[in-house]
Image (tube, grey):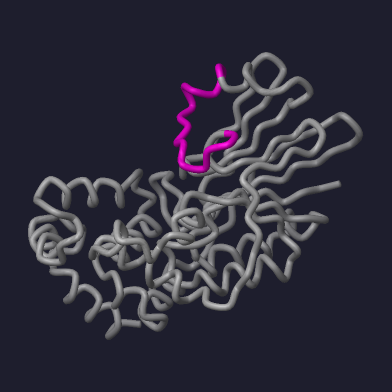
Amino acid sequence: MRTLILTDVHGNLPALRAVLATPEAQSCQRVISLGDQVNFGPEPREVLCLLQERGALMLLGNHEARLAHADAPEYAGYNWNMQRWTKAQLTGLSINFPVDVQEGGCLFTHGAPGDPFHLLEPVDLPALLDSLPEGVTHLFSGHNHAPWLIAHHGRTACNPGSLGILEDGRGGTAPFAVMEAHGDTITVTRHCAIYDVGDTARAFLHTGCAAAAPEMSRAVLHTMRTGEYQAVLKLVRFVISLGDPGDAAVWREADRRWPWRESMSTPEFWHRMEASL
């Protein structure tokens, strides 16, 4: 049995399509997505529908967990515009997102077992692997957008890396893993597909995602293009350093001061992007 393991697609439909078109993915009999299928990217509904069509098992990520409470007062600020926009795109869809799934010697989760918000780092993995229940030999997780495949004391931890927003310093690449099980023997291989980030940029515009959350959309697109590690988090922290992140005026001031790769305001960036696509 060959299983395609994905994580953190984040609404990036062109990247998902590129992965599913690879010979490695097409040789798999099933698909498991480790959470954060949606938000940040411009086509969350299309991503969920495509994964449903493939019969994928989709786990709960921190972004799906927040969407369940997107209308709560604490998410009313400007900084949560993209989350509210994403929820609106998913109207009418009903999907069960389990937190963890264990199958034989494999445990599938998003962040850490039992907690989709817990961000693991490679340094955390040896102790975590040692703490896994007896019989579990392989841990598959996401949440951290950087990939790893680490063995420790006879157990293995695999993070395929974010398919939709890979932070590898390159950009335009969509990672995934293939797990092959023969009885008690499990092998894991990592792979990567190339996709056209221009297709995703166009989607930010035609879906209205860039209009709903222009600065956040720009930071996400920047990460997709360059693979810069935690570029979105860096921007959010800068906004917080200036004032209330729920205030649109604070974001406009951050936009004015932030050292964007393109030396122009975010409204001008999207205007030029639309003219060039």
Magenta residue check for 138? no
Quadrant in the rendering for residue 275: bottom left
Magenta region: 113-127
244 vs 197: above or below: above
Where is residue 231 drawn, in percent x and y? 30, 49
Quadrant in the rendering for residue 193: bottom right
Where is residue 9 drawn, in percent x and y? 53, 58
Q: Residue at x 67, y 40 (%)?
A: 108
Quick check: 122 left or right of 224?
right
Observer-nearest of 171 and 161? 161
5 vs 17: above or below: above
Q: Residue at x 70, y 30 (%)?
A: 138
200 vs 166: above or below: below
Give the number of callouts: 0
Q: Residue at x 89, y 36 (%)?
A: 182
11 vs 267: above or below: above
Q: Residue at x 54, y 63 (%)?
A: 15
Quick check: 158 left or right of 234?
right
